[in-house]
Amino acid sequence: MRIVVTNCNTTRAMTDEIVRGARAAAGADTTVTGLTPAWGPESAEGWLDSHLSAAAVLDALRGYREPYDAVVMAGFGEHGREGARELLDVPVVDITEAAAHLACLLGRRYGVVTTLDRTRGQIEDSLYTAGVAPHCAAVVGTGLGVLDLGDEERTTRAFLAAAERARDAGAEVLVLGCAGMTGLQRTLGDRLGMPVVDGVAAAVRLAESLVALSLRTSRVGSYERPRAKRRTWPSPPPW
């Protein structure tokens, strides 16, 4: 099985970190490849970044020529998943949606711990669209930017403080609200005394399940193939 994991920004070091987390979660027979957009923001933190990122990721997927069986979109709360499902003939699993669905299987209400408070609106909208917002107790920011997550000690302290706020709001399960937090669930789950879901790991496992069950995106209604028309892209098409 071959899974492509798309970073939502142009920072290749983050792509590498996301791929490491995805490979750790994947089955032995699954190949994971990272895809970094050629243009767009170096970190996605806000509405403008998110819309730019969505277009850049779709452009990268459109030009990707190697064979693959599923796509994992590793941008928490970022736009683009619906467009990717229209564009591609393989399952597309978004880490936001995947993490929330798994969290709902582990507790009655979950909380999301993310980066900056400014991203909370995007995440809430994404959860609402996915149909899992009613089970979300809180989306809590750590105050750290995406590019600040490399400082493990600082990130751990900030995550624990935000996690306590989410738990106080009624969360019984925690979700890591940024692909750059991949790996924290192993070190913090025991300290918090509650399940911690990593969106990258959740999405990889769900993507594997969809492929194994021979399930693909429905072409009836919302995700019909895009209508034939002239479209101008930043780069030439691969055909």
Image (tube, rainbow, N blue to C red):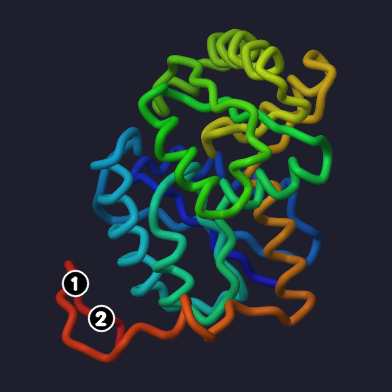
> Which label number is shown at residue 237?
2
Residue 84 or residue 220, whichever sits in front: 220
Give the answer, above or below, for where 239 lies relative to 145. below
Q: Residue at x 45, y 49 (%)?
A: 7
Residue 148 as seen in the image, left or right of residue 156: left
Q: Amino acid at mark 1?
A: Trp
Labels 2 and 1 touching (C-beta < 8 A): yes
Q: Residue at x 54, y 46 (%)?
A: 127
**Residue 64 x, y percent position in the rendering:** 40, 72
Residue 152 as seen in the image, left or right of residue 122: right
Check disc 2: other Cα within 10 Å, few if <14, some if 14-19, many if 20+.
few
Q: Which residue is mark 1?
A: 233
The quadrant holding residue 186 is top right
Residue 107 or residue 45, whichever sits in front: 107
**Residue 124 x, y percent position in the rendering:** 49, 38
**Residue 199 x, y percent position in the rendering:** 63, 43
Measure the C-alpha gap from mark 2 to mark 1: 8 Å
Q: Residue at x 21, y 88 (%)?
A: 229
- Viewer-nearest of discs 2 and 1: 1
Q: Residue at x 53, y 85 (%)?
A: 219
Q: Amino acid at mark 2?
A: Pro
> Which label number is shown at residue 8?
none
Q: Secondary structure at mark 1?
A: loop
Check disc 1: other Cα within 10 Å, few if <14, some if 14-19, many if 20+.
few
Residue 222 or residue 147, whichever sits in front: 222
Name the image quarter holding the C terminus: bottom left
Q: Secondary structure at mark 2?
A: loop
**Residue 182 x, y percent position in the rendering:** 62, 35
